[in-house]
Amino acid sequence: MAKPLQKAASTGSTKPVDPTRERDAQIIARVLGGERELFHELIRPYEKGVYLAAYSLLQNEADAEEVAQEAVLKAYRNLANFRGDAKFSTWLITIALNEARGRLRHARVIEFDSIDEPVEEGSDVTPAVISDWREVPHEALERKEVRELLARAVESLPETYREVFVLRDVEEMNIAETAAALGINEQLVKTRLMRARLMMQKILAPQLKSRRTGFLGFFSRKAGGSWL
Amino acid sequence: MALNCRHVWKQISDYIDGTVSPELREEIELHLANCRHCSAVLDSTRNILVLVADDRTFNLPVGFSERLHERLEEAMRE
């Protein structure tokens, strides 16, 4: 369905209205106007995103939760500085990523290979070459084993690829938002994303294929077993 | 010049996102129609992306939201 359009008064051009951005802008204005309690509602849709952004770097539940809390408190205390150039969610996630990086630096556990990154162009990443693929349906996610496979694959990505992959493909931010949150350009996001996705395919395709027989009983019951 | 498999792999991510040019899209699709390996790479990659984006894949720790809002409430009282 087409997005509703509004006329931009100053330029006469039209631009799509983003209902989420409008909602956030209205709540932010009210919070800054004194209705502080509304900040709870402002952040509610983004709690998971903030946690996952922190987790993508820290890979530790307790640390990620603490950093997510710190990021939310920092956003609350600095809300007046939010200019609205980016979405509120992007701003919030940027704060979480910065907090997480700060913690990593403090712990001196930044891996040097994440800084001295190999050449971005001319990727050496090759996918798992398979001859056919039968779709793994959503119902597979009801199995803890499948969720753990996916989580472990994400965790195994090098840091610079993991953060791009989590923002773009787990949190479903677009390329521009991902670039803004990470402070890198869009082409670099695309290059890292390409490599991360191929790495994920390389790790997961053989594992998910090899587990098809294990899924048979489950899907025979849940989905008629038609995917095998 | 026809695309080879390696060229296609490098473009698969942009192809999935729909950000390749119409000309390149046509070349990729021509290759995919004749290469079962690249078709399987595309299908498996797409499938994996659908699975990781599912809300059930990554969960918040139990009680995360409650603890977050309690801490926020404390900060608001300061």
Image: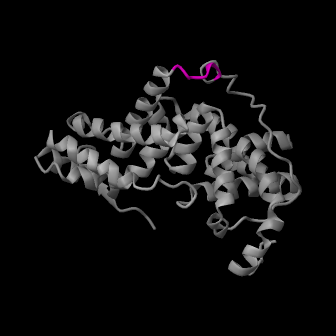
- The part of the image, by quadrant, that contains residue A44 is bottom left
Frontmost residue, A108 versus A118: A108
Front residue of A90/A104: it is A104
The percent position of residue A40, horizontal first and vertical second, equals 26, 52
Relative image position of residue B19 (x, y in whole percent): 61, 47
* Residue B52 position in % (x across, y down): 61, 54
Please say if B8 is above or below A58: below
**Residue drawn at (67%, 39%) of the image:** A156
Q: Quadrant of residue B75?
A: top left
Q: Give the residue at x 62% y 19%.
A: A112
Residue A213 on the magenta segment: no
Tell me if A192 is positioned left or right of A225 in this view. left
State yes or no: residue A110 in magenta: yes
Nearer to me, B10 or A35? A35
* Quarter of the rendering occupied by the C terminus of chain A: bottom right
On screen, residue A186 versus residue A158, left or right, reads: left
Query: What is the count of numbered marks?
Result: 0
Query: Is A132 displayed left or right of B52 in the figure?
Result: right
Q: In terms of depth relative to the viewer, which is nearer, B60 or B33?
A: B60
Identify the residue at horizontal 47%, vertical 52% (top origin). B61
Residue A20, by quadrant, is bottom left
Q: Predominant secondary structure in magenta?
A: loop
What residue is rendered at 18% in x and 52% in y?
A37
Rendered image coloring scheme: one colour
* Residue A212 percent coordinates (x, y): 81, 65
The answer to whether one can see residue A135 in this image is yes
User: In the rendered image, is residue B41 in sight?
Assistant: no
Q: Which residues are magenta?
A: A108-113
